[in-house]
Amino acid sequence: MNKNIPWVIKYRPRRVSDVVNQDQAKEKFIPWLRQWLQNRVPEKKAALFYGPAGVGKTSLVEAAAHEYGLELIEMNASDFRRKEDIERIAKIAATQMSLFGKRKIILLDEVDGISGSADKGGLDAILELIKVTRHPIVMTANDPWDQKLRPLRDASLMIPFNRLSERYVVQVLKRICAAEKLECEDAALKYIAQRSEGDLRSAINDLQAIAEGYGRVTLDIVKAVVVSRDRQYSPWEMLRNLFMSKYAWQAKRAVTHTDLDYDTVLQWINENIPNQYTDPEDVWRAYESLSRADIYLGRIKRSLSWDLLSYVFDLAGPGVALARKKSKFRWAKYSFPQKIMLLAKTKEMREIREALAETISKRIHASKSTVKRDVIPFLMIIFRERPDYAARIAIGYNLTDNMIKYLAGPTYSKIKEHMNLLLLRMEKPALASEESSSGAKESVTARAAPSPSSKKKATRRASRRRRRGGTQSTLPI
Amino acid sequence: MSSIAELLWAEKYRPRSLDDIVNQEEIVKRLKKFVEEKNMPHLLFVGPPGTGKTTAAHALAHDLYGENYLQYMLELNASDERGIDTIRTKVKEFARSRTPPGIPFKIVLLDEADNMTADAQQALRRLMEMYTTSTRFILIANFPSKIIEPIQSRCALFRFTPLKKEDVIARLKWICEQEKCKYTEEGLETIYEISEGDMRRAINVLQAAAAIGTVTPEIVYKVVGLAHPREIREMIKLALDGQFQRARDQLRQLMINYGLSGVDVIKQIHRELFSQELKIPEELRIMIADYAGEIQFRLVEGADDEIQLNAFLAWLTLLGQKMRGS
């Protein structure tokens, strides 16, 4: 199964009955559609579906088209500007279907996206379309009450859609969990449903994002990731709103009306710019803007001038949203910031590296970052190429097994063999010269120091230093 | 082999006393004066990495206090401390501890002091004044200009210069003799070229090269090649090929798996730009270097290294597209 299909598409309703909790709308819509199918042209040739986002307006049209075997001609109304698009649709609409041809239904999505005088032509084109059409036209809108949409309202059968009640949202989420064989806690689904405020699409998007990010859906994760409503936006919604913004104020609103802190907002945008934009120039423009946002954030953190925060949002919001000049807006699958996940996954390894850097930094009097940059890479070479020599360095610095594993990778067991051999060899002269000393687990460094055969200045120095340090940890054997 | 333990040569062959330091003669002479007089002002050591600043500070303390000098010296690294507050607490505690016999002061060694913000340096200045009767500060920095004026004026300034080629090679040769490792003259010269006068780096390269085989230019280049994450070059290539997301994945590998900072990464990118392994039109190298410099500046100014470097990669991706288009 292709993992990249958004679930809102994968699980879109196939039949009218699959569209949940919109019986009133169906009661108006279906008889109107049947009239068309019986070749009786209704009084209103267009229907206008209106209501909040994600409650099934488009889905109902799609489900009906599927169920009644209609060819769906779909067009986003806000793109309804180019002359050739208009002409193409108009031609389809005005053509009587052939005897054996499929019946058609025309869907103009988001007609309230048409705005201002710039789009006057678009509005006229739609009205003209309604006049000439020989096929049913359905339009959708969130808010149809704008003055300029009045001619459309007059020409259409108005069909309201309501927010979905919570239990219907939960019901759909459950069905998806079962189909995806996902481990989902009921309480988690309920939480998602609650905060979706009847927006099934955002609920499904949240579910998918959590499932893909974490592999399971529990209340703990949901609470941590999904932000409580109050018209605050979850990360996914924040991104959707941001990238769909046509105006600077919308984009600014998207990044400020969220409970996420500014660092997290930047991380989500940082992760998802290339998911949204396809053209390299747009990607670069967006990152340039994000880079400048981050510079403001750096200045704020250093100088504590929090009144600069607004500029961070200007550049991370509108700056990124308006970077789109060449890419077309498209449905993008947003992902959880990989950096945060990678940091969580590599926590143990980074702690080992940090401890290793600290051990060495104290001995060679350099900062940990210098050690990480200038010393550890060379140690890694020695540990991977010369296990025998590495074994002696491991003993010299009392490195833990984990540190050796980090440095050596595949040669770890060879180094351990060499270390055991060396320690055994040490054991014999030590036992011969100091019969009183016994106990296999005694500190190796304590043995190494008094070894009479040891002439090496460096070893003496090392052991002296360790004595001064006072800790003589036992080497794992 | 009599001993079973081995050390990093950077530790093993670090000069212990001022007498062991063979270069920076002028500086050593002045420092020895302090030992003679058993008195000194606050000191500021500046100079490029690996020129012996930290070593000189330790040797000075060693010569002043003797073999157990570490109990009279507090060693701090500004890059590793969590801020001026922890530094203040440590200095305060240290100032209270026992004073050395015969010498009226102890030493606070603050390495990489130029990594402190101007505000933290102001606080440091007050700290220096507060404990001036019982402690002397030795501040170490790469760039004197990054140390605020009031601190500079309170310190005796010592400028460490990059080590001369013959000094570096003589030292490497001496180490090779101690370690009985095989080398060629050209091998050691290559190490000098690569390490750009940074003695610590030169010794690290030498040790890794000697561990693999005879120290020849080939082995030296092999070691340096292995030590540089190959992801850097791959990352540049991926971006120029238009694969921004994969380049970004490589970047994360570098920063998280190797623990490199953003500045480390951009510097390595810069080094890579002039390698012939990277096959791009010559004039592009300059353009990329220019933008890399811009990004390095932003890394210092900004808050999140990855965002800044992603901007760099996005630009490379765009450049790659234009390059293919023309």
Image (spheres, rainbow, N blue to C red):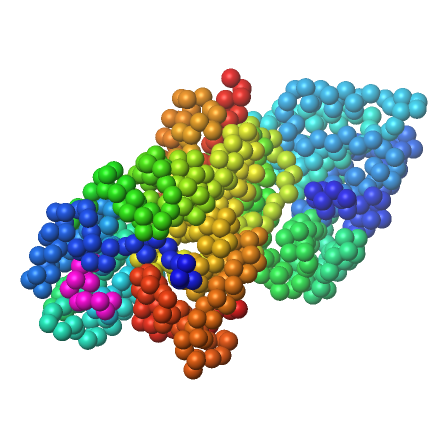
Point out the image quarter for the N terminus of chain B.
bottom left
Return the residue nearer the eye: A414 or A102: A414
For residue A52, above or below residue A188? above
Q: Residue furthest top?
A: B326
* Position of residue A305 in the picture relative to residue B309 (left or right): left
- Residue at screen point 65% across, 20% down: A83
Q: Is residue A81 visible?
A: yes
To which quarter of the image does residue A225 belong?
A: bottom right
Looking at the rendering, the stretch of residues picked out in magenta corresponds to B59-70
- Residue A151 spot, x, y in % from top left: 68, 32
- Residue A306 spot, x, y in % from top left: 36, 53
What kind of secondary structure does the magenta stretch mostly adopt?
helix
The verdict on residue B92 being magenta is no
Count of numbered labels shown in the rendering? 0
For residue A262, above or below residue B37? above
Q: Residue furthest left?
A: B37
- Residue at screen point 45% across, 68% down: A426
For residue B148, above or below residue A457? above
For residue A14, above or below residue A354? above
* Position of residue A83 in the picture relative to residue A341 (left or right): right
Return the residue nearer the eye: B110 or A388: A388
* Position of residue A120 in the picture relative to residue B87 (left or right): right
The verdict on residue B63 being magenta is yes
- Residue A373 spot, x, y in % from top left: 40, 48
To which quarter of the image does residue B167 belong?
A: top left
- Residue B100 spot, x, y in % from top left: 16, 72
